Every structure is written in structure tokens, then in C-alpha cells.
Amino acid sequence: MVSPPGAWRWILLPVLFLLLVSVPGGHVGAYPERPIRMIVPWAAGGDTDAIMRVAASLLEKDLGVPVVVVNIPGASGTAGAREAKKAPPDGHTIFSVHDYIHTTFYTGVADINYWDFVPVCLLTSTPSIVAVYGRARWRTFRELIEDAKRRPDEIKAGATLGSTSHFFLVLIERKVGSRLWRYVSYEGTAPRMTALMGGHIDVAESNLTQLDKARAGQIRFLALATEKRHPSAPDIPTLREFGVDVVYAVNRGLMVPKGTPGSVVARLEKACESVARDPVFADAMLKQGTDVRFLNRGQYTIFLRENDALNKALAEYVGFKRR
Amino acid sequence: MGRDAITGCLLLGLSLWLYRQTAEIPRPHFVSVGPDVYPRILLGLLAGLSVALLGADLLNRGGRRGRGGGRPEARIHRASYRDVFLTYLLFGGYTALIPILGFRAATVSFVAVLSWCLGPKTVRHAVLCLLVAFVFVAAVHLMFEGYLRLLLPRGILP
Amino acid sequence: MIDLWLTGLSRVLQPDVFLSLAAGVVAGLVGGAIPGITITMTVILVLPFTFGMDPLQGVATLIGVYVGGESGGLITATLLGIPGTASTIATTFDAYPMARKGEPGRAVWLGMWAGLLGGLLAGIPLVIGAVTLASLALKFGPWEYFSLFVLTLSIVSSLSEQSLLKGLVAATLGLLLTVVGSDPLIGAPRFTFGSEYLRTGFPFLAVLVGVYAFAQLMRELEKRHEGQPRLLAAGSASLAISHRRIIREVFQQWANLLRSTLVGLWIGVLPAVGGSAANILAYDQAKKFSRHAERFGTGIPDGIIATESANNANVAGSLITMMAFGIPGDAVSAVMIGALIIHGIQPGPLFISTKPDLAYGMFSAYFLATVLTVPIAAGLLRLLLRVVSVPLQFLVPVILVLGAIGAYAINNLMANVWTFFFFGMLGYVMVKCEFPIPPLILGLILGDQIEVNFIRAIMTESNPLLFLTRPLSGLFLILSAASFAWGILQMRRRAVPGGLPAPSVRG
């Protein structure tokens, strides 16, 4: 073995470098041409993740390329939104989004809103429920509201402050026209339900995924925020039945970065529609307490605009200021 | 002043500086405990501990010098520090290169270059370094991208 | 009951489920053993494979990963001194020194057998007392959580070899690091200085692996030129051990084993506490009950037995909370719940009674995975030992790249690779300044939870005295004070001339 002179290194490196650069090769083809990243701005195992993983596997079937779920949790979902916004607008990155995109904007957490993306479709809608501690003394929603009006600031409501679970309860306060709750910060559905089961909070927003806990008597569902009673739980009255006109749900859809070509968006929209019509998807969503609700990009754009105005008003009502 | 005393001073400065920064944290009126409260408590604690660290070092200075003898690091070969420095330098460069070259190219270069620099300077070793780099990256790529569907960063180069 | 067991067991022993479970154990062992790839990440990576399986087969695979991962973490902690996962931080305290003293086989197998026994013991309450235990856990309010985390932190600070003060500084720095980024209350930016990168904060996994991997590898590089024996120079010769002797050693410490199992089990049952606390608390109780506390940290069996039995019991604990109430005990069980949901099963309080086949299948899978880990680990260990004896010039870049991949995969951001690198430098500086690293990591892991529970408590009842007057919370705080007192006492005793302990990353 001979020890090479120092110059060896300087020959070796460029050769190595050339070798490498020539390895991967890109070519232009019809969309989609390679695996698609679906950015889920929350951790694996959550509601959004569970819904979107089902959607991804069905999108894959329609598009013919792998659709890989990429979880980018952090900073109340804004880390994922930021990455999605930065991604090249070629349809190979899609962003799964829900109402948090409006709330984080108006509470000043993020400076990204729905208008930074091109809407593709709305896929699902998960109706909200007013839930109380399983051994609470309120049997009906009316009893709860009357008690809350009598002693505002005493009944403890768990919520992710400045997000959907908070705004839902604020919306009720606004419709009832009175302060009702004392808010306690519990971020995420799982910690909130745990605290509700332990009686550390009295009220919280819940959804039909937690039906099992209600059936077991550990939490109690008082009212559902839908227009009509829900087929999976016909025994739960709606808020409207109590004269509180609140219809509220967490709505999940898909978007792509701004600048994505129209033909690509149209292809994705078509795939999205076939997912929404797939009985496998409907069945999976039913078991997740979620309604399939398809809106095409035109309808979804209008929906987003209206939803945005509502969230803006709610954020101002609560007292958030955009920075 | 000993090393602990210097650290204590630095940490004290850090906590005071960060304490001033807490004024920037927004405090909405509808929460009873704002997001600035907890950092302030911690910074107060850190400031107190830094002062204690400083004090303890100044008080113990004489005793420690007598007992400690030569610090163990003093014996470490200078060549060792060169290797340590080189590793940090190359890893920093590697991290900067990933978004440009993409994971594959950047990693092959990093593994080959670092193992070459840390090993004997022979032709045999150079070949071995290249081989290890290529095999390792191929294995990692197959494993994560092909099988586990974890998409590794792409570069801006094709 | 018996017939449910038989159905469950027979289902798990069918080739398809059995093979997936075994594959899960292998994946867990490998994932846990690679520094940078943690159990949580392995479970997420394996998750897509379970979509095509039937529910039991899918969950059995994930249970295999979970159980196998704990033992994989043990291997890295022992052989490299780098905790592959957060739940093996305290394992490095005694397992790594023992391995360095030329007994890697004994160190690994003590942990392996203790883990098996702890896992089996903790399986009993999983089957017969799940609902009772989980109901107890629900009684923990924000006050209790806050005080429990404070206790964990005070313990890890006072375990520090040289200085309680430095331990406390490290812990406070760790807590302060969690402040950087968006606040947990309303997402307001704190100490981000306008940087988007700092907005997401520092994920503790990137920090953990960065600090330990760099610190450990750099020390190896330093020693290389001194002609000191490198890591595992003794090699595989010392891997030959007598299992009978080791099992006897574990059984001799039955009281330690039992206590550690209980600690691990209970921490597992509590939602959102996690294996790192179980590991530390178990080590601490072993040390405090021991008659030779001063020998802890020098490579004695007691520490290994305590930490590893607690780790495996912790798995059973978090399965209890998950199966009894559908509440995730930690990040791994959150992913498992996600896997069940994708199969259309929402685990909740009625899960065991409405889906007994699946539930007993999962119980059986847990026991089977615990038992299977031992022979599979034995096979892999030989391979892994060979990996460890790879020359340092190859080991360093390879481990660093794996660490970088792991950091990246936390949330698919390059920013985490920079975090990994930055804390790699900080770790080295800390070691050089003789600051202990475990308090920093624990501070970082528990920081968010400490703040969140502190705020929740105040938001729920504005009276701060409740931290002291609620019985359990008060007890935890008194115990933390006692822990400090004990730490100071130990230090006084040690101040009498005596040799410094063997150098390790603990500092």
C-alpha cells in the first residue's frame, strides 16, 4: 500500500462529485409522474391523520402513483402550512387542511391563510358536539345553559384556545348572548376528552369519534351542532332544538400551492371526487364519526370565503388581535 | 476565575437579556396567565442558579486547584481536536448541502470525505471509503424511500 | 374468560399474525437500536404496512414494534452509550460503564432478562385490572401532573455525579429551550426573533440524539489518539455469558425488579408522561433503596435491572390506558389508536367488552412479543455487535447520517437537522464544562407539559396553594424537596477524597 500525496484528495473529490451529480435523472412527463406528498400538518394518530390516510390510499388508486402522507406537526399546524406554501406548485405536493387555517390567521399565530393556496376540494365534515363530564348534574343542554348564565365564569370549558374547539363554544356564547364559560387550555381532542372523563373540566367540544365514551357514560353528549339529527346518533338532540342556531363542524379538504397549473388542479379535483364517491371511503368515515361532504373547487372557494368571514368575526369577538 | 464562574456569568447575562425580551411576548386580555409568565419564572430561576454557580466557583477556587491536578482534557492529543473540529465542520457543510444536492448526493460525499479524513491516507482506504459511502446510501435509500416510504429531501439540482 | 384467551392466543399463533408480529419485533429492535430512529418513528414507518392487514394482525405488528423497540434501545444504550430512545437515558448510567469494563454481554442480557420479567409481570394488571388502573389515572389533574414532572426533574438533577447545582442549571436550560417557539396556550411566538425556523421550536428527539451522538462520538475520536482501548475493544469474546448466572442475578434483586416494574407500569398508565420519566424514576428508587448507592453509575447490575424492567412495564401501562379508555398513553400508542381507527375501530371504554376477540388478541400479542423479543434479540445482537466493532472512521459518519435522517423524519423539516447539529455542538461543550446532560434532556421533554399543566391549574382554580394542599400533588413536591436534600447529603459524603467515577457522557 502506497500513501498517496495530498493532491490525491483534490482529484478524488471532483471525480466523486461528478459521479454523483450524474446519478439521478429527471424528465418531463404527464402529471402525475412521481410520488405525491400529502402534507398533514398534525401528528400521526390524530383525527386529521386518520381521515387523510384513508383518503391518500384511495387517491393513490385513482392517480396511479403513491400518495405519501407526510406529517409536519408544530406551531398549531402552521409549520405544515408553511412547508406546503413553499413547495413547488406542480401538484406533487398537496396540503390537507381544516378550519384552523382561518383561526390561526385571525388569532395572529400565522400569516398564512387560505388565499395562499389553490383550493382543490372539500372532502369531509366532522360535526361538533357539546359534551359534559359523565357525572355532571346537567342532563340537558338547556340545564347547562341556564346554570352557566346564572354563574358565568365558573363552569370550566376545556379548549384549544384560538382554535375550532374554542370558537365553537364562543359561537354558542354569542348566539345565547351571554358569557358562559371559564376557558381552560387543553390542546387536542385526546387530552380534552381525558380531562373531561376525569372531571377536571366540565364542558368541551367533542365529536362522534368519541361516541363510545358517551355510550359508556364517561362523558355525556348534550347537543349536536348539525341541522338535523345525525343518523349515527339519533338520540342526541341538535342545538337548534334548544333554540340555539349554531351549525358547526370541522371541515377537511385539500389544497395545492399557489401557481399550480389549472390542468393539474382539475386532475386532482377529479381524483378527489372519485374518493368522495367511493363506498369504501364513506364506510371508513362513518366509523370515524365524519360525514363525507364533497365540494368541487368552485364551491369550496365560496365555502372558504364564507368560513373565513365567520372566523374573523369570532376572533374579534373573543378579543384576538392580528399582529 | 474558573470555568464555572465564566459559565455562570454568561448564563446570568443570557437570562437578563432574555428577560428583557419577554416584554415582546404578546399578552391577550382574555387569559389569566399570559404566555410571558412561565418564561419569566424560568429566567428568574436561571439567574439565581447562575449567581450560585459563580459564587460556588469563587469560593471553591483554591481547594479545587489543589485537588484536581491536571484536567483530563489537557492530556488529549492535538490531532484528536483536529478530528473533532473536522467532523463538526464537515457535518455543518453536509447539512447546508442537502437542500442543494439532495439527500443522496450530499450523503455519499459526506460519508466518503469524512471517513477518508478520519482514516489512514492510503489508496486502499480511499477506495474503501467510496465503497462504504455508496453501499450505505444505496441501502438507506432503498430502505427508507423504497420500502418505508419516507421521502428524503430532494435537491434543487435534478 | 378462558375461552377468550384461547381464541386470542390461537389467533395470534396463526402463521399470518405470528409472522407479522415477529417482523414487528425485528423492526422494533433494529429501529430502537439505530441511534436517531426512535420507537415512535419506527411505528410511524411501519404503520402503512398494516393498512392491508386485518385489524388484529395490524395491531399485533405495532405491538411487536413497541415491545421490540424497548430492547433495541437497550442495545444502543449499552454498546454505544447513546440512548436510542428517550426511555433509555438512565439505562446508559450503568449499562454503558459495565460494557466498557469488558462485560457488554452481561450488561445487555441483564437488561434483556429484566425487561422480559418486568414485561410479563406488568402484563398481569394489563389483563385483570386495566379499567381500575386507568380510572385511577383519570384522577390526576393538572396539579398532580405538574408536581410529578417537577419531581422527575429534581430527581434527575440530583442524580448528577458532580454537582447538584450544575444539574439544576442544565434542567433549567432544558426547560428554557421548550419556551422557544410557539407558546402552548395561544401559539404566540416566544424568543423566535422573527425567525420562521425557530417558530416550530426544538423537537426533543433531534436534541436528544444530537447531544448524545455527537458528544459520545467526539469523545471516542479524542481518545483514539491516546491509544486508549476503543469502545468494545474486548469485542465479542465477552459476549459469551452464562444465561443461568444472569437470570439468577436478576432474581436476586426481586425487590428492585418488583418496585421498578410498578413504577414503570404506573407511569405508563398516566397519559402523556412517557417512558423517559419511568426510566429515571425507576433508577432513582433503586438507588435510594440500595445499601450501596455510591456504586450506582459505575456499572452495577442494579441500575440496569431497574431501568429495563421499568421500560417494558411502561409499555404494558400505556396499553392499559389505551385499551381501557382509548386514551393514548404516549406517542406510540397514539399511532396505534390511529391504526385501529383506520381499520374502522375506535378504541374507547367499551372496546374490551364489545370487541373481546380483538382485545384478547392484543393481550396475547403483547405477551407473545415480550417473549419473542429474547430469541430475536439474541440473533440480532451478534450482528449489531459486529456493527459496533466497525472502525471509527466509518462509524462516525454513518451514525451521524442516521441521526440526521431521524431528526429530519420527526416532522419532515430540514430545520431539525440544523437543530441536531447545533445541539451536537452544545452537548460537546456541556461535556467539556462538566455539565450533566440527562437533566437538560428531561427538562426539554417535560418542559411543555410542566408549563401547560401549570397554566391549566391556574386557569381552573386561581388559588396556587392547591399545588401543596391537594394530597398527591403535595406529596410529590415534598418528595422533590427530599430528593434535593438527599442529593446534597450524598455530595457532602462524597466530598471526602475519593476517585472520580469513570468518565461517561453523564459528565
Image (cartoon, coloured by chain):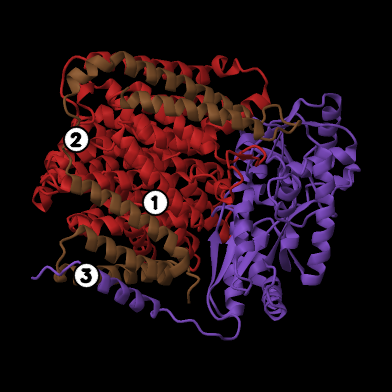
Gap in Å between the C-alphas at discs 3 and 2? 33 Å
- Would residue B41 be seen by someone viewing this image from the given angle? yes
Callout 2: SS: helix
Gap in Å between the C-alphas at discs 1 and 2? 36 Å
Callout 3: SS: helix
Chain bearing mark 1: C
Name the colour assigned to chain A in the rendering: purple
Callout 1: SS: loop
Left or right of residue A77: residue B91: left
The verdict on a common chain for dots 3 and 2 is: no
Chain bearing mark 3: A
- Locate residue A17, reporting x and y percent: 34, 74
Name the colour assigned to chain B in the rendering: brown
Residue at x 90% of width, y 36% of height: A177
- Locate residue A171, reporting x and y percent: 83, 43
The verdict on a common chain for dots 1 and 2 is: no
Chain bearing mark 2: B
Kindly indicate the quadrant of the structure image that contains residue A36: bottom right
- Would residue A222 be seen by someone viewing this image from the given angle? no
Tell me the residue that label 3 is attached to: A7
Say the numbered circle drawn on residue B74.
Answer: 2
Tell me the residue that label 1 is attached to: C38
Gap in Å between the C-alphas at discs 3 and 1? 41 Å
Which of the image's four quarters has the C terminus of chain C? top left
Mark 3 or mark 2: which is in front?
Answer: 3
Kindly indicate the quadrant of the structure image that contains residue C86: top left
